[in-house]
């Protein structure tokens, strides 16, 4: 009897390890793609050529800029809400497109900050993200209620960020950034706990596990990117 229990436990652990290898593979792959795209496109010549238009009133952003800024929202919702119906190939294409669009968005944002600020903020983000990921994986406390609350705050922040994009209020941006640090670190722990539970579910088929690993990689990637941007607004120097 004990031998059967040990075998089941060992099998569950093996499934969990393979699942998280895939999750982190997707996450770091997306970060690499976004980083390469941001580096290649992050020049004043590229940004002003493709994202700005010269008008009688001066220089203003064009329609392509808005597509690049807001299309990732639709892709993220498509992946998270439609992964059961979509094939793995379609999900991979949507995931890759998401990472490319975020990279293009970064090419505009990162022009406003020094290389040193970006590097320091990245390492701070990596440390905070790693700590909260470990906490979420190891804690015995149920984080469901906290996650639900933080998700509601996140929705409010998202709406406020869109409004502030057009209003351009410095104090509001500062408040959103502070909230973002707390929200995205907390959600990192929450999603890690959820992913741990998913990884240990032996009833999932191979295809389901692969799709959920991709969704998990997307969620952690989103948390990392948004935490990085929140910290960069607070700590970065242009």
Image (cartoon, rainbow, N blue to C red):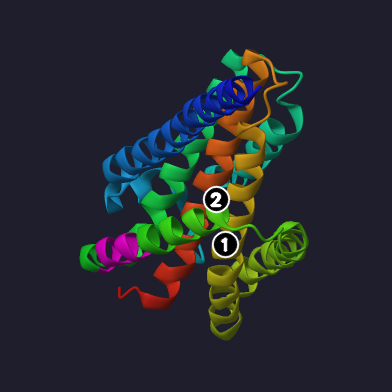
Occupied quadrant, residue 153? bottom right
* Identity of the residue furthest to the left in this view: 116
Q: Which residue lies under the disc numbered 1?
A: 184
Query: SS at mark 1?
Result: helix
User: Percent from the top left, x then y, of residue 40?
Assistant: 27, 40
Q: Which residues are magenta?
A: 117-124
Q: How many numbered callouts?
A: 2
Work out whether mark 1 precedes mark 2 in sequence or the reverse, and give the earlier one.
Answer: 2
Q: Nearer the viewer, residue 102 or 178?
A: 178
Q: Nearer the viewer, residue 106 or 24?
A: 24
User: Percent from the top left, x then y, of residue 219?
Assistant: 58, 44
- Magenta highlight: main SS: helix
Residue at figure coordinates x 34%, y 38% from the top left: 32
Residue at figure coordinates x 57%, y 14% from the top left: 89
Occupied quadrant, residue 39? top left
Q: CA distance from mark 1 to mark 2?
A: 16 Å
Q: Nearer the viewer, mark 1 or mark 2?
A: 2
The local crowd at label 2, few if under 14, some if 14 to 19, many if 20 or more residues have their Cα within 10 Å, is: some
Residue 1 located left or right of residue 223: right
Q: Which mark is residue 137?
A: 2
Q: Nearer the viewer, residue 192 or 70?
A: 192
Q: Is residue 71 visible?
A: no
User: Percent from the top left, x then y, of residue 192?
Assistant: 58, 48
């Amino acid at each position: 009897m004990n031998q059967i229990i040990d075998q089941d436990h060992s099998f569950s652990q093996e499934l969990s390890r393979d699942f998280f290898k895939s999750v982190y593979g997707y996450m770091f792959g997306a970060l690499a793609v976004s980083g390469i795209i941001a580096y290649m496109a992050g020049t004043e010549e590229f940004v002003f050529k493709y994202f700005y238009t010269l008008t009688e009133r001066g220089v203003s952003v064009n329609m392509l800029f808005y597509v690049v800024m807001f299309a990732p929202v639709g892709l993220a919702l498509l992946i998270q809400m439609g992964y059961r119906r979509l094939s793995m190939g379609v999900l991979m294409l949507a995931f890759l497109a998401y990472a490319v669009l975020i990279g293009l968005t970064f090419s505009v944002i990162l022009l406003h900050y020094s290389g040193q600020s970006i590097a320091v903020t990245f390492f701070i983000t990596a440390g905070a993200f790693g700590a909260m990921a470990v906490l979420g994986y190891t804690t015995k406390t149920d984080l469901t209620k906290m996650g639900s609350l933080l998700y509601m705050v996140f929705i409010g922040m998202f709406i406020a960020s869109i409004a502030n994009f057009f209003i351009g209020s410095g104090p509001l941006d500062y408040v959103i950034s502070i909230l973002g640090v707390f929200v995205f670190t907390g959600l990192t722990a929450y999603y890690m706990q959820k992913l741990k539970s998913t990884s240990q579910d032996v009833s999932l088929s191979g295809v389901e596990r692969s799709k959920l690993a991709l969704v998990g990689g997307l969620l952690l990637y989103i948390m990392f990117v948004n935490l990085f941007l929140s910290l960069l607004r607070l700590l970065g120097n242009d």
